[in-house]
Amino acid sequence: MKTSAKKASSRRPNNGLPLRGKAFVPPLTVTLPPMLKSGGDVAFRETLYLMALTFGRLHTCREAFGRALGLTASQFIVLIGTAYQQGSEGVSIRALADHTQLAATHVTTEVGRLIAKGLLTKQASTLDRRSVLVRLSPKGEDAIRKVNPLLRRVNDLLFADVSREDFAAVSSFLERFALNSEYALAEIRRFERERSSAGRLARNAGQD
């Protein structure tokens, strides 16, 4: 009976689980020497996960600031960006887009929505009639004052124990990272175009 049981056990399926053997070693996801530690990229990947976590939380904060005013996160950014850039004459769409790091077309859309809500006003530039200058309305000024206490408390918590040198280093890194991200996205677009083209060629070949 024991012998037959052993034979039956040896014939049992492994339920799709891989057999034990040599451990899988994933290939490096980056080859830049400064990004590697002891020849590996584990620390690099953990830093990326941390960046994704913190950037996600920053966006959550933006959403909360917007909700406090009945706005979306991007509408809040355009509103407060206007507050800091309008000066005495107003701010152009291009200057506002550069300040907030949003696409000019997106800023134009959100400005229109904020005007409809009575939070912004616009007028033609006295220097260039083709350019539109945006300003806070009195209602928009009240909105900025209303959200400021929450904004200040959250920012004080976010950046507690961060030195001026730490913040300057992060700012310098993000400037470089933002530029590099443009090249990275261009590479992704190139890869996807090539994959799409290869897929079409394969389908056409199958039809011949």
Image (cartoon, rainbow, N blue to C red):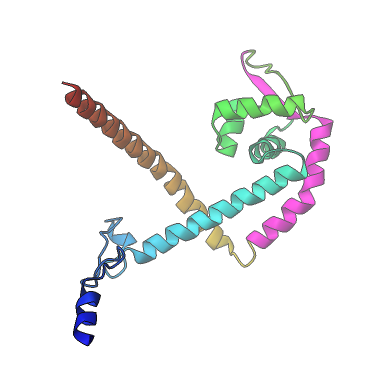
Image location (x, y in percent) of residue 148: 77, 48
Eyeballing the image, is 159 above or below 171?
A: below
Of residues 197 and 16, the one drawn nearer to the viewer in this rendering = 16
Eyeballing the image, is 70 above or below 137?
A: below
In the rendered picture of this protein, how many numbered marks are placed on residues? Answer: 0
Magenta stretch, main secondary structure, is helix
Q: Does any portion of residue 89 appear in the rendered image? A: no
Eyeballing the image, is 207 above or below 165?
A: above
Image location (x, y in percent) of residue 78: 66, 35
Looking at the image, the residue that sits furthest to the front is 1
Quarter residue 13 falls in: bottom left
In the displayed structure, does residue 64 sit left or right of residue 9? right
Of residues 134 and 62, the one drawn nearer to the viewer in this rendering = 62
Residue at figure coordinates x 66%, y 38% from the top left: 81
Residue at figure coordinates x 29%, y 37% from the top left: 191
Image location (x, y in percent) of residue 16: 30, 62
Q: In the image, is residue 26 part of the stretch drawn in magenta?
A: no
Quarter residue 75 falls in: top right
Looking at the image, the residue that sits furthest to the bottom is 2
Of residues 38 and 199, the one drawn nearer to the viewer in this rendering = 199
Q: In the image, is residue 135 part of the stretch drawn in magenta?
A: yes
Image location (x, y in percent) of residue 183: 36, 39
Residue at figure coordinates x 54%, y 62% from the top left: 165
Q: Write down the region rendered in magenta.
A: 130-158
